[in-house]
Image (tube, rainbow, N blue to C red):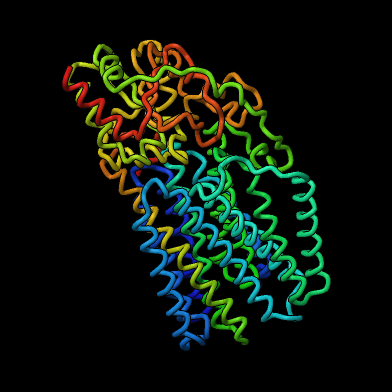
Amino acid sequence: MVIEVMSNEIALLAIFLLSIFVGFEVVSKVSTTLHTPLMSGANAIHGVILVGAIVVADHAKTNLELGLALAAVILATINMVGGFVVTDRMLQMFKGKPKVKKDSGDSK
Amino acid sequence: MSRNLYDLIGLAAGICFILALKGLSSPKSARRGNLIGALGATIATVIVFFYANGGKALNNQILILAAIAFGVLVGVPAARKVQMTQMPQLVALFNGVGGGAAALVAIVEYLKLGDGATTAEVIATVFTVIVGCVSFSGSIITFLKLQELMTTRPVIFPFGRQLIALTLIGVLASGGWVISSGGSTPLLVNGILSLLFGVLFVLPVGGADVPIVISLLNAFTGLTVAASGYVLQTTLLIVAGTLVGASGTILTRLMAEAMGRSLFGTLFGAFTAKAQASTGAVDARPVKSGSPDDVAILLNYAQRVVIVPGFGLAVAQAQHTVRELADLLASKGIEVAYGIHPVAGRMPGHMNVLLAEANVPYEQLVEMEEINPTFPQTDVVLVVGANDVVNPAAKTTPGCPIYGMPILDVALAGNVIFLKRSMRPGFAGIENELLYEAKTTLLFGDAKDSLTKVVSALKAL
């Protein structure tokens, strides 16, 4: 039996839609104490645009394209690396195992 | 590296990001969550070097590595050295450069594809350029506001609404122009108008609402990353970007709720904002200001004292002195607690981070809902460098920028002491009626100096 594989476009759409639901679910219950670190962590994650910046820098044909792509690499690296470092610094402050009253209930 | 292997490893990185967000939602696992996210990002970055050029060394590899090294050299010291008080604006800045990077990636890919781009790719490119540019310029403005390099009050200018609406129409029209005719000029116009729109969009936002805007722009940047992932056919970027976009949207709503703000009102403040009625008449009214000795006596004969820390405490680096005072009061048998407003500081949770840095015992930090019922039994409230979070105007003055925000009901306590630098209103720029009440004593000066004087006066009693 031949099973037809999803077309690429539909597969990407499925990934996109499922990711929306996962994104909604994972942060739906979070105490105000963690709003700032969570935002900062999410901010660092979108620094992964660095991957895209590297790809376009590799493909670049003209100097203009290369220049713009390298600028993107620099900006994305700052976003990603700086983002994770500053989030870690914020979270270090919680290391005394504080008692947080409005714990989301999900403690691992 | 084969496409399948690359996609599988990319999938693993995507799962790392999901676990990271999940971990960051709970205090116990937050730090580990962040490290898992960093691991995922590292994996994703390393494997692209082995895949993008069919397994051969990348074109321009040296330049790319140099650019990454440069980015690390800028980003890491900034993240390491920033004062904890200035952290929100650094996050805003990081978010802005991320949005800028996404816009640049889409532009380069668009230039390369030329006429070969499909309509769907062009639409995704236009989306990335618009939202990425708005996120970039908007974040720069939030940075300037938080750093107080420009006014924190809403900036309202004549015909502002019309100008913003026109710019938005221009952004959408030039986006349509790109889609219908292609070429680089329309895209340039589109990018410039989008940058302008980002500036105009954030300018009318008042200081107290800036964190919500940062969170929203953060979600925006996530979506641009997802859109450029579509242009580049990279699943990982779609997953990571969408995750941030979706979770960022929820987080923005949660933040707005914690601050008692309507998300709609914040976002479309630009269209609805009216100039605030000025309260010039109140400036001349008398206030009761006291000496450190007066304050020490009030505290000495109290049975229960609640300390309300605000951003002024953090700016003066007075965390340690306030703790000394709290210890001293406790040694006299006085009950001491800290009343923490959810948005004390600049962002939700910011004050907890700052006090934890000064080793204030976590048990003494009491959240707003729990401390509010205890104020009638409290003899003295010591407000250190806070203003908006105790301003009764949030309850009594419909139409003021903080109206509806839940506040600490310090007015219910026997006495209120404000340690303030001056009569200048708080970050939201609103007059605080509580300052003029008979039960209120003001001690002017730098929070740390004032506290040190109060501590020595207390010791002398």
Determine the image quadrant of residue B115. Answer: bottom right
Image-quadrant location for residue B254 = top right
Establish if B379 lies above or below B178: above
Q: From what the image shows, is residue B15 above or below residue B42?
A: above
| Residue drawn at 65 percent across, 54 percent down | B199
Would you say residue B338 is visible in this rendering?
A: yes
Identify the residue at horizontal 70%, vertical 65% (top origin). Answer: B192
For the residue pair B309 and B254, the one nearer the viewer reads as B309
What residue sits 45% from the left and 33% below the top? B342
- Residue B8 percent coordinates (x, y): 48, 70
Residue in view at x 33 percent, y 29 percent? B365
- Please, is residue B252 above or below residue B394 in the view? below
Between residue B394 and residue B13, name the one nearer to us: B394
Left or right: B232 with respect to B376?
right
Residue A64, position in %: x, y?
62, 82
Quadrant for the N terminus of chain A, please.
bottom right
Q: Position of residue B195 (x, y in %)?
A: 66, 60
